Amino acid sequence: MNLNQSELADDFLPRSRQQHSHHRLTLISCSLLITLATGSWFWREIQLHAAQQLIRDCIETQNNCTDNLDAVEQLVKAKKSLQLFNLESAHLENAHLEHANLKSAHLESAHLENAHLEHVHLENANLSTTQMSGAHLENAHLENVNLSHAHLEHANLYRANLQGAHISHNHLQGAHLNRANLQGTHFYDADFEYTRTLAKVFYGMIRGYFI
C-alpha cells in the first residue's frame, strides 16, 4: 500500500496547529485563573489590613467611627484574631462576633448590647463598665475576665465559662446563668434583683465544683 507523503503532511499540519492552539488556550486560561485568584487574595488582604487600621485609628482619635462595627465583623468573618485589640468604648451593638478571638482585648465601656457572642473567646479580657444587656453569650469563654460594673441585664450566659471572673457592682437583673461554670468566680456587690437569678448563680457555683 502506497502512502502519499504529501497527503499525510497536509493532514498532519492542521492537526498539529489545532493541538498547539488548544494547548496555548489552556495555558492562557490557567494563567488568567491564577492571576485572578492571586489578585482576589491580595485585594482581600488589603481590605482586612484597612479594617484593622480603621479600628486602630478610631481608638487613637477617640472617635466612634460608624464603620467600626463593619470592620470588626469583617475581621471576625475572615477568622482574624482580635487578641489584645483595643476596642475601648467601641459601638458594637447587635454585632455578629460568634467564635471571635478576643482574648485579653480591651473592651472597657464598649457597647455590646444584643451582640451575638456565642462561643467567643474573651479570656483575660477587660470588660469593665461594658454595656452587654441582652447579649448572647452562650458557651462563651469568660475565664478571668474583668466584668466589674458591667451591665448584663437579660444577657444569656447559658453554659458560659466564668471561672475566675471578677463580677463586682454588676447589673445582672434577668440574666440567664443556667449551667454556667461559676467555679472560682468572684462576686462582690452584684445586683441580681431577682431571687430566681440568684438561685441560678448558686446552682452554677455548686455545679462548678463537680465539673
Image: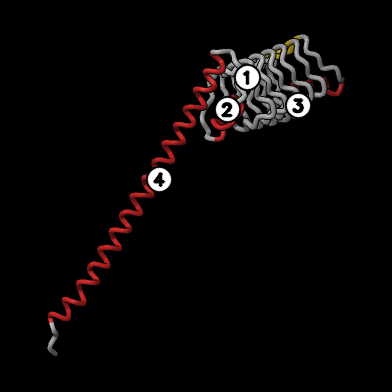
Lower sequence index among marks 2 and 3 = 2
In percent of width and height, residue 93 lies at: 69, 26
Q: Quadrant of residue 4?
A: bottom left
User: Residue at 54% across / 19% down in the picture?
Assistant: 85
Badge 1 vs badge 2, beta-carbon distance below 8 Å: yes
Lower sequence index among marks 3 and 1 = 1
Disc number placed over residue 33 in the picture, else none? none
Lower sequence index among marks 3 and 4 = 4
Q: State the count of labels.
A: 4
- In this rendering, position of residue 192 left or right of residue 98: right
User: Residue at 59% across / 24% down in the picture?
Assistant: 68
Q: Name the residue that disc number 4 marks.
A: 36
Q: Tell me the kind of residue under disc 2.
A: Val
In percent of width and height, residue 188 lies at: 75, 10
**Cα distance in 3D space between marks 4 and 2:** 26 Å
Kind of element beneath mark 2: helix
Q: Name the residue that disc number 2 marks.
A: 72
Kind of element beneath mark 4: helix
- In this rendering, position of residue 182 left or right of residue 65: right
In percent of width and height, residue 62 lies at: 59, 13
Lower sequence index among marks 4 and 2 = 4
Q: Name the residue that disc number 3 marks.
A: 134
Q: Name the residue that disc number 1 marks.
A: 90
**Cα distance in 3D space between marks 3 and 4:** 43 Å
Please identify the quadrant where the C terminus is shown.
top right
Q: Count residues near mark 4 (Cα–Cα under 10 Å), then give few for <14, some for 14-19, many for 20+.
A: few
Lower sequence index among marks 4 and 1 = 4
**Cα distance in 3D space between marks 4 and 1:** 36 Å
